[in-house]
């Protein structure tokens, strides 16, 4: 190993049986979570979710906020709706979207705080 370089692996393999046994079962609560983060990993969709965390918007509003066309905005909104991350309601000729759950807005706010603190 060169000077100043830190090895990121243990030099010997040894584990805490109690911790491993306990956490091996606990980590299963994350099942399905990667699907949520994959949906939010798209820049367009994260912008939409952020905007919807602030207020309900019609598809046309979303398209204008993103600087895109209605078809593109609608495509992303449909995906979010199908995943349960957004919900829609129709009022006359307009379709309005909002977040599917207020906890999603809290997740976005938490991620923004994390970024503001310069952690990434």
Image (tube, helix red, strand yellow):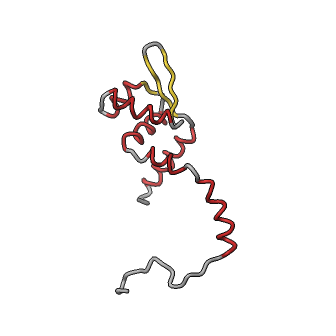
Quarter of the C terminus within the rendering = bottom left
Which residue appears at 65% of the width and 60% of the height? 26
Residue 119 position within the rendered picture, expressed as x and y whole percent measured from the top left: 43, 60
Residue 89 position within the rendered picture, expressed as x and y whole percent measured from the top left: 51, 22
**Could you say which is closer to the camera, residue 42 or residue 115?**
42
Q: Quadrant of residue 15?
A: bottom right
**Could you say which is closer to the camera, residue 104 or residue 23?**
23
Question: Where 100 falls versus 92 (above or below)?
Answer: below
**Could you say which is closer to the camera, residue 40 or residue 53?**
40
Give the total number of marks visible in the rendering. 0
Q: In the displayed structure, does residue 72 sit left or right of residue 39? A: left
Quarter of the N terminus within the rendering = bottom left
Which residue appears at 49% of the width and 33% of the height? 81
Residue 98 position within the rendered picture, expressed as x and y whole percent measured from the top left: 50, 30
Which residue appears at 50% of the width and 46% of the height? 36
Residue 100 position within the rendered picture, expressed as x and y whole percent measured from the top left: 54, 34
Q: In the displayed structure, does residue 22 sit left or right of residue 90? A: right
Which residue appears at 69% of the width and 66% of the height? 22
Q: In the displayed structure, does residue 92 sit left or right of residue 18? A: left
């Amino acid at each position: 190993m060169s000077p100043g370089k830190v090895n990121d692996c243990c030099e010997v393999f040894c584990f805490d049986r109690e911790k491993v046994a306990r956490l091996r079962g606990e980590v299963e609560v994350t099942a399905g979570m990667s699907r949520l983060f994959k949906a939010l990993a798209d820049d367009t969709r994260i912008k939409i979710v952020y905007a919807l965390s602030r207020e309900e918007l019609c598809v046309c509003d979303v398209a204008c906020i993103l600087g895109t066309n209605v078809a593109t905005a609608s495509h992303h909104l449909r995906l979010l709706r199908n995943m349960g991350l957004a919900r829609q309601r129709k009022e006359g000729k307009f379709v309005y979207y909002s977040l599917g759950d207020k906890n999603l807005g809290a997740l976005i706010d938490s991620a923004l705080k994390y970024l503001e603190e310069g952690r990434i």
